[in-house]
Image: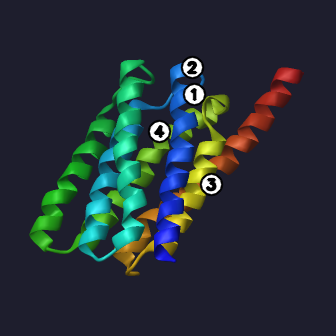
Amino acid sequence: MKEAFSALAIGLTLWAFIPYIRSIYRGKTKPHVFSWVIWGSTTFIVFLAQMADGGGLGAWPIGVSGIISMGVAWLAFQQHNNFTISRLDWFLFLIAIAAIPIWYLTQNPLWAVIILTTIDVIGFGFTFKKGYYKPFEESLTFYSIMTVRNGLAILALEHYSTTTVLFPAALALVAIVFIGMVVVRRKLQGKAFNT
């Protein structure tokens, strides 16, 4: 059963990203470059930590997502989408990278996952800000699919611990809040355009 959950979660990852990437090429979706750099690097490092803590098959959807997220960052960079990089962007990125030596020094992947989950949630702030002001430039389908994917990834885990569950659970929760905010903003902007 774990294999089925993992395969389904990887399938959902691809299903979410393919139209999202197509939408980037069409210029409809304009992702924030540094959000995706942070998400890609943190997600892949969390994948490594999950594997180290016995996450097994449930970690693989997270690893696939990390690799594809770095690809999205590259596409956003190539298309010069939201290319403003602030000191906060650099700070979050450097902390994300610092999680690797912290993990090495503590010999405990939990600390890396806590740091990286916090950074990912903070990194989501750039997308929240953009989604608030430009709610029609984000794909709610993508975030909905990724929320379900995270649930399936949790079900596919071979070992349950804070190290293996925290990251996908936190990101699912943040995505649900983001979706709700964008829906409300779209309705409000739609009313503003109709008056």
Q: Looking at the image, do the residues carrying marks 2 and 4 touch, with CB atoms under 8 Å apart?
A: no
Tell me the kind of residue under disc 2. Arg
Please state which of residues 57 and 179 is positioned toward the viewer in this rendering: 57
Secondary structure of residue under mark 3: helix
Secondary structure of residue under mark 1: helix
The answer to whether one can see residue 169 in this image is no
In the rendered structure, which disc, 4 or 1, sits on the residue that comes first in sequence?
A: 1
Distance between the alpha carbons at the discs numbered 3 and 1: 22 Å
- Can you identify the residue that label 3 sits on? 177
In the rendered structure, which disc, 3 or 4, sits on the residue that comes first in sequence?
A: 4
Q: Looking at the image, do the residues carrying marks 3 and 2 touch, with CB atoms under 8 Å apart?
A: no
Q: Position of residue 85 (x, y in %)?
A: 34, 28
Distance between the alpha carbons at the discs numbered 4 and 1: 19 Å
Tell me the kind of residue under disc 4. Phe
Identify the residue at image location x=65%, y=44%. 141
Distance between the alpha carbons at the discs numbered 2 and 1: 5 Å
Identify the residue at image location x=52%, y=77%. 1
Q: Looking at the image, do the residues carrying marks 2 and 1 touch, with CB atoms under 8 Å apart?
A: yes
Q: Which mark is residue 82?
A: none
Tell me the kind of residue under disc 1. Ser
- Can you identify the residue that label 4 sits on? 126
Quadrant holding the C terminus = top right
In the rendered structure, which disc, 3 or 2, sits on the residue that comes first in sequence?
A: 2
Tell me the kind of residue under disc 3. Val
Q: Position of residue 161 (x, y in %)?
A: 38, 80
- Can you identify the residue that label 2 sits on? 26
Residue 76: which quarter of the image? top left
